[in-house]
Structure formats: C-alpha cells, structure tokens
Amino acid sequence: MLSADNVSVVRGTRRILDRVSVAVRPGEFFAILGPNGAGKSTLLHCLAGSLEADEGAVQLDGRALSSWPARDLSRRRAVLTQSPSLGFAFTALQLVLIGRSPHMGNNPGRIDLRAAAAAMKEAGVAHLAERSYLTLSGGERQRVHLARVLAQLHSEEASARYLLLDEPTNNLDLGHQHLALSAARRLTEQGVGVIAILHDPNHAVAYADRIHVLHRGRTHAEGAASEVLTEALMREVFEVAARVLREPQRDRPYIVFWPGNRSTLDDQPERRHSCSSP
C-alpha cells in the first residue's frame, strides 16, 4: 500500500496541504480531483517521494518512503509529471528505454527491449520509435513519456507497484486521452496501483475506483463516484453549474455542465433524463 498520513506542506504562512490522508492499494485506480491551487500536485509529489512533507508520514508497504534506496523505489513506482520535457535529440525508443534504467545494466537486454516495445504499443507510439523526440508534437511527446513510465513498471517480480500520473491527459486529443487512461486502467489488472490527477470528473467516473477531492489544501470528500460527485460538490468546490445524471448501461453518474458559473443552474429546468456513455 502507498499511503500518506496527515500530511501537511507549509510555504511561508500558507498551508498548501493541511493534514491530508490517502491510502492506495495495489490494483486500484485512485483519482485526485480539485480546482487549481487545491494542492493536488503537491500531494502527488509527496506520494512520489520528490517532496518531503513538513508534517505527517508517507509510507510504501509500511516503510517510510524516504528510507527506500532510490533504485529500489524506482522499480516500485513511476511518476509522469505535468508537461515533462527533454532537450536532447533522443529517439522516442531511446527515451522509453530510460524508463528501464532501474532494471538494466549499461545496455538494454532483451527483456528491456520487449518491455519498451510493449509500452510504446500500449501508448500508441510504436510508429514513432525512430523519430527524434525534438520533432514530435506536444501530444506525441506526452504519449512517449507515458510509454517511458509504463516500461519502467514492467516487472516479473510479484512486488506491488504504483504509477503516479499528474494530469496525464495534458496536450492530448479526446481519443488519446482515453487511450492513456485505458492503458493506466489495464495496469490495475496486473496489480498496479494508479494514482492520477484528473481535471475532467467524467474521466474519473469512467476509470477510477475511488475519488479524492481536494479543496483549499484539505480533503473535501473521498469515495466512489456516485457518493462523491454531487451537484452540491460541483457548486461548492468547482463553482460550476452542473447536473449529475445517471448513465443507465453501467449505472454510474454522468455530469453535464452549463456555460457560466454556479448561479447559472438556478435558471435551468430540472432535467430527469439520462445520457449515453462517453
């Protein structure tokens, strides 16, 4: 299990995170939602081990994250940050193979090459293998980095692994957004725990097992989508006008938005119909 217990991060007089606790199990897709400035990326960096909390504890399998050797930790968790960049003219395949660094020696072996090829296919970038990273579009670069972290987590060991995604749909068109989230979802079938910061609540509904909503640095709600994503929450946390409908085929909520702010909803007639799955 990857967990944060009463974690706080303080910058000056501001508490960016204020006693936030989360626990993510192997094989679970855990989505973090919240408005800009809510502390989502800060929480993810604490869970990744790249930021030390001022208060509280972060643990991997009951052991303090800070006590894990870097190589061992890199075999157990991979992180895709917002808008990752690279200034070198590596090919896409070479960049993906960087994800295999915790597992291989000086040169990639057959297992590493197979893992990289499978990850590139999963991320929809196999055809870009020999292209220079610097010639790729923003969306193509994002998917190559996704393939890199997928390759990093490829392992024949039975230990629990975790994938941390900070807004993984950045720069992606609609089809590739779902390709990326579907790839992450399939990892959970292999026992990988996925923690993803998402902006679209309907993506969280479609892919996540549990949702954690942050607001002003604190936990506002956590649970299944049907419990968490209410019209009241959309008004209070996101300040948007929305109706929460039911998608009948899978018996799950689906959120429809109106232009304008939360007051717009007061002028809308009650809608009782359901809409189809995205």
Image: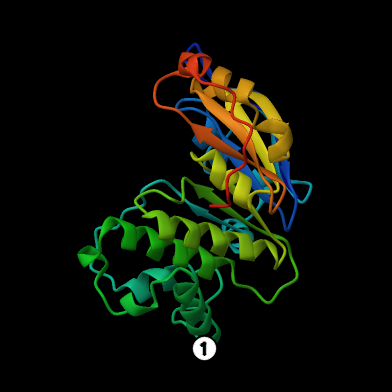
Callout 1 environment at 10 Å: few (<14), some (14 to 19), or many (20+)? Answer: few
Instruction: Give x and y (percent) for residue 82.
Output: 41, 46
As drawn, the residue found furthest toward the top would be 13
Q: Nearer the viewer, residue 201 or 58?
A: 201
Q: Is residue 173 visible?
A: yes
Above or below 20: residue 189: below
Image position of 7 (left or right of 1): left
Q: In the displayed structure, would residue 213 be above or below residue 94?
A: above
Seen at 46% across and 76% down, the residue is 121
In the visual, does 202 lie left or right of 145?
Answer: right
Where on the picture, by quarter, is residue 47?
A: top right
Front-most of residues 8 and 23:
23
For label 1, the residue is: 110
Q: Position of residue 183 (x, y in %)?
A: 55, 64
Residue at 66% in and 39% down:
211
Q: How is the image coloured?
A: rainbow
For label 1, the SS is helix
The residue positioned 58% from the left and 66% from the top of the image is 153
In the picture, residue 59 is in which quadrant?
Answer: top right
Q: Residue farthest to the bottom?
A: 110
Amino acid identity at mark 1: Arg
Residue 89 x %, y %: 23, 68
The reply to whether residue 9 is visible in this rendering is no
Q: How many marks?
A: 1
Residue at the extreme right of the image, as rendered = 62
Q: Position of residue 156 (x, y in %)?
A: 68, 77
**Above or below: residue 187 compared with residue 81:** below
**Between residues 219 and 148, which one lies in front from this camera angle?**
219
**Vertical order, 56 against 126 (above or below):** above
Q: Nearer the viewer, residue 140 or 67?
A: 140
